């Protein structure tokens, strides 16, 4: 009833009639409006399809046999092993408590499945078809009758409804804060049909795919074993995924094995995928130990994230004699919007001039030449290398979006004419760029941070401008230490604190948010939608792992409202460029760098399709094990 009352109020407000009616006629008028809205929805064409795409048609027809980028004849067998840094004490990736391992998500599935060669497409995995009206205000999933949990029990619509309600009640806070307002109701129509109806007045564009992407658990198993979505646990929930838990050594190792009775082994989405019999993950305390483990064959596939290691460390015998393959593979994903993220909850960072000044003191050009062997590119935009990145001064499409916010006093008029904020350019010859030092000093003076006799800047209260960089990555020390020295030259009391991953999670995650500056990434996607609220909206400023910076800006809130309902790709690009322009003008982070390729190394016992899809490396998905190559390595004593 509460949800329905809320929907009535929204419909009335949007049509403006409630304010023109008096007394008891308000509720009646609102109800009539909702009834008319529902009648219009009933008059719409109902689409029955094997999937859904945000914009344009699906790439694959209803009768497709397999995805274009897989090898449908890929052999099954063997093991792939990788490394994770740190430790784990939980197999529950949906809880704030404990430290979970990311590989645990392989155990679970959702109604819809995505592909690695399309943006915004979702196909029926657990469903035979889905039905929805043209405005996407509701969706019905017609579930397959052969979906089985890994214990062989059937999945029904009751499990879907149970899982949906579970995430509504116990899901992470940023999910609940946004998602619960958008779904008006969920109801089981019969054992294999479930309907989701979305809240009137909210954007419907992404909602059918969003509810279809929710993880589905077994209701019977959850209730029988008194499981808790909010609690850390080394016993996984019962899912329908292609792998099940084989064994684990808490904090050290986890092994998943392919389920021989996996219900969807012959589903078109899965042909040529899930090829390994086992997926093994080894845990290491630091990356140096992990790299040595790889060289000695403790694990056999490594994605390198340290450019120095990539440039200088892969000269060991295995690479030289060809038993270890070293490759740079194309990565078509959006570059991560990585940077040094400010905690806006700190009073000292609430002045944009302070944030901009700190950003001026990071010398990317010197770092790239001296530390990164020229292999990295600079991040400027949240949506770097895409049509969603703001460039130059805003065009008429952006001005139309930004002008009302300027008129309301939410944005300065300069946003309509200024060039999009770009990362500062520094000299590559030396770490400290004098020109940028002068600019930063002027900004800090304007913000009230004055240099004292000891060379440190203080505000009117006599407090020094302390800036602590917090990380769990020792590899970043060689990057951040010169940055710290540059900041100290500007009078900033900067320091670097390297802590262990568990401490970092405790300090950086809600409710603590106990940090100054955090090396991390801002959230982006190829088709921005509802997740933007989880990352940048005021409603998630103090409860979201995605909005760690604590952004609460009315202009940004309104710009997100333009992104979500965009009906064409062109509208989405314009709305996102406007959002990108404003986010960059706020100097929320000091942009870092990105790698346009995957750096991978692996023992020569794996193969992959000749042409990889643009949006996934897919080593555990559509790569496969070559038994003859593996036997050769073992015969040579390379592998145990």
Image: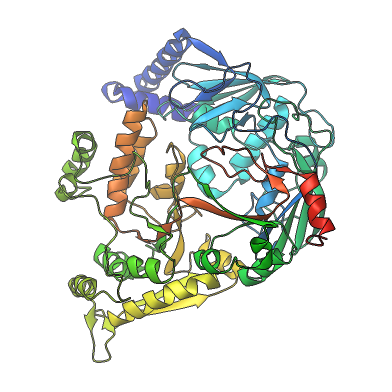
Residue 93 coordinates in the image, percent (x, y): 65, 50
Image vertical order of residue 311 relative to residue 192, above or below: below
Judge whether residue 209 can be spotted in this image. yes
Residue 248 in which image quadrant: bottom right
For the point 27% across and 64% down, the residue is 356
For the point 22% across and 42% down, the residue is 405
Near-viewer residue (393 or 562)? 393
Image vertical order of residue 437 relative to residue 64, above or below: below
Judge whether residue 464 can be spotted in this image. no
Residue 635 coordinates in the image, percent (x, y): 84, 57
Residue 427 coordinates in the image, percent (x, y): 27, 70
Residue 28 in which image quadrant: top left
Q: In which quarter of the image is the N terminus?
A: top right
Near-viewer residue (337 or 585)? 337
Residue 276 coordinates in the image, percent (x, y): 76, 43
Q: Is residue 506 left or right of residue 362?
A: right
């Amino acid at each position: 009833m509460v949800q329905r009352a809320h929907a009535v109020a929204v419909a009335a407000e949007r049509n403006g009639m409630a304010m023109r009616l008096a007394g008891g006629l308000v509720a009646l008028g609102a109800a009539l409006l909702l009834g008319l809205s529902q009648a219009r929805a009933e008059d719409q064409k109902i689409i029955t399809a094997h999937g859904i795409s945000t914009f344009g048609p699906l790439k694959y027809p209803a009768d497709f046999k397999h995805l274009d980028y897989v090898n449908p004849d890929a052999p099954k067998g063997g093991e792939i092993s990788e490394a994770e840094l740190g430790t784990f004490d939980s197999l529950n990736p949906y809880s704030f408590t404990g430290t979970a391992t990311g590989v645990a998500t392989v155990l679970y599935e959702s109604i819809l499945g995505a592909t690695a060669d399309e943006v915004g497409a979702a196909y029926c995995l657990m469903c035979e078809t889905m039905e929805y009206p043209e405005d996407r205000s509701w969706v019905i999933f017609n579930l397959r009758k052969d979906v089985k949990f890994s214990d062989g029990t059937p999945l029904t619509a009751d499990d879907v409804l149970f899982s949906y309600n579970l995430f509504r009640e116990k899901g992470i806070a940023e999910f609940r804060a946004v998602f619960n307002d958008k779904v008006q109701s969920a109801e089981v129509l019969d054992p294999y049909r479930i309907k989701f109806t979305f809240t009137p007045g909210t954007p419907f564009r992404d909602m059918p795919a969003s509810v279809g992407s929710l993880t589905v658990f077994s209701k019977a198993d959850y209730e029988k074993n008194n499981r808790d979505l909010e609690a850390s646990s080394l016993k996984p929930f019962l899912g329908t995924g292609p792998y099940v838990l084989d064994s684990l050594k808490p904090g050290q190792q986890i092994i998943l094995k392919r389920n021989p009775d996996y219900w969807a082994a012959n589903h078109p989405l899965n042909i040529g995928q899930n090829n390994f019999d086992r997926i093994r993950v080894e845990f290491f305390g630091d990356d140096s130990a992990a790299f040595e483990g790889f060289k000695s064959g403790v694990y056999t596939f490594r994605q390198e994230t340290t450019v120095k290691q990539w440039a200088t460390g892969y000269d060991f015998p295995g690479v030289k004699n060809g038993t270890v393959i070293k490759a740079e593979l194309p990565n078509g994903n959006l570059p991560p919007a990585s940077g040094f993220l400010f905690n806006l909850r700190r009073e000292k960072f609430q002045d944009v001039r302070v944030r901009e000044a700190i950003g001026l003191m990071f010398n990317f050009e010197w770092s790239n030449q001296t530390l990164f062997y020229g292999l990295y590119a600079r991040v400027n935009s949240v949506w770097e290398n895409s049509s969603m990145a703001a460039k130059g001064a805003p065009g008429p499409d952006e001005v139309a979006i930004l002008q009302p916010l300027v008129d309301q006093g939410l944005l300065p008029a300069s946003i309509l004419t200024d060039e999009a904020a770009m990362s500062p350019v520094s000299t590559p010859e030396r770490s400290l760029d004098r020109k940028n030092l002068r600019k930063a000093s002027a900004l800090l003076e304007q913000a009230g941070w004055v240099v004292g006799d000891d060379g440190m800047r203080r505000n009117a209260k006599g407090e020094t401008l302390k800036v602590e960089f917090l990380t769990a990555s020792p590899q970043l020390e060689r990057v951040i230490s010169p940055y710290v020295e540059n900041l100290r030259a500007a009078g900033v009391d900067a320091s670097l604190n390297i802590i262990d991953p568990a401490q970092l999670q405790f300090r950086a995650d809600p409710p603590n948010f106990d940090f100054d500056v955090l090396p991390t990434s801002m959230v982006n996607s190829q088709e921005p939608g509802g997740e933007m609220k989880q990352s940048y909206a005021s409603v998630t400023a103090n409860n979201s792992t995605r909005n760690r910076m604590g952004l609460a800006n009315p202009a940004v809130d309104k710009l997100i409202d333009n992104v979500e309902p965009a009906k064409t790709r062109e509208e989405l690009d314009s709305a996102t460029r406007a959002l990108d322009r404003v986010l960059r003008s706020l100097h929320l982070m000091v942009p870092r760098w990105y790698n346009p390729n995957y750096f991978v190394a692996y023992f020569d016992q794996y193969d992959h399709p000749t042409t990889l899809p643009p949006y996934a490396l897919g080593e555990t998905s559509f790569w496969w094990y070559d038994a003859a190559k593996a036997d050769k390595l073992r015969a040579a004593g390379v592998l145990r």
